[in-house]
Image (spheres, rainbow, N blue to C red):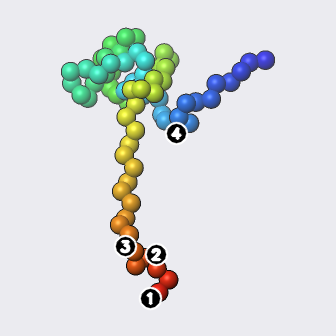
Amino acid sequence: MGFFRKPICGQTIAPACAYCVHGQPAVDPRMILCKKRGVVTPESHCRSYQYDPLLRIPKRQPKLPGFSPKDFSLEE
């Protein structure tokens, strides 16, 4: 019997060298230096991919629309 590891941030994160344990940002922001494959694009990945949650920068949440006290009153 084996134990299954749950993904840390869910299944929605696609593998990418930009947040892999083996990758480091290069001088060129469009490239990643991989210990296994050399210079690669941030979107690529290989069999040695290991997710590092500290390298991933989450997307910002959209701003909520502004509400006024009139929106919450029952009087018209």
The N terminus - image quarter = top right
Amino acid on which the number 1 mark rests in the picture: Glu
**How far across and down, in percent of the image, does residue 69 sit?**
40, 74
* Disc 4 to disc 2, C-alpha distance: 36 Å
On the image, numbered disc 3 is attached to which residue?
A: 68
On the image, numbered disc 4 is attached to which residue?
A: 12
Residue at 56% across / 36% down in the picture?
Answer: 10
* Disc 1 to disc 4, C-alpha distance: 44 Å
Residue at 21% across / 24% down in the picture?
Answer: 28
Question: Are dots 1 and 4 in contact, CB under 8 Å?
Answer: no
On the image, numbered disc 1 is attached to which residue?
A: 76
What secondary structure is found at the residue carrying circle 1? loop
Question: Are dots 4 and 2 in contact, CB under 8 Å?
Answer: no
Identify whether 64 is placed above or below 3.
below
Amino acid on which the number 3 mark rests in the picture: Ser
What secondary structure is found at the residue carrying circle 2? helix
What secondary structure is found at the residue carrying circle 4? loop
Amino acid on which the number 4 mark rests in the picture: Thr
Residue at the farthest bottom position: 76
Label located before the other in sequence (3 or 4): 4
Label located before the other in sequence (3 or 1): 3
Residue at 21% across / 21% down in the picture?
Answer: 27
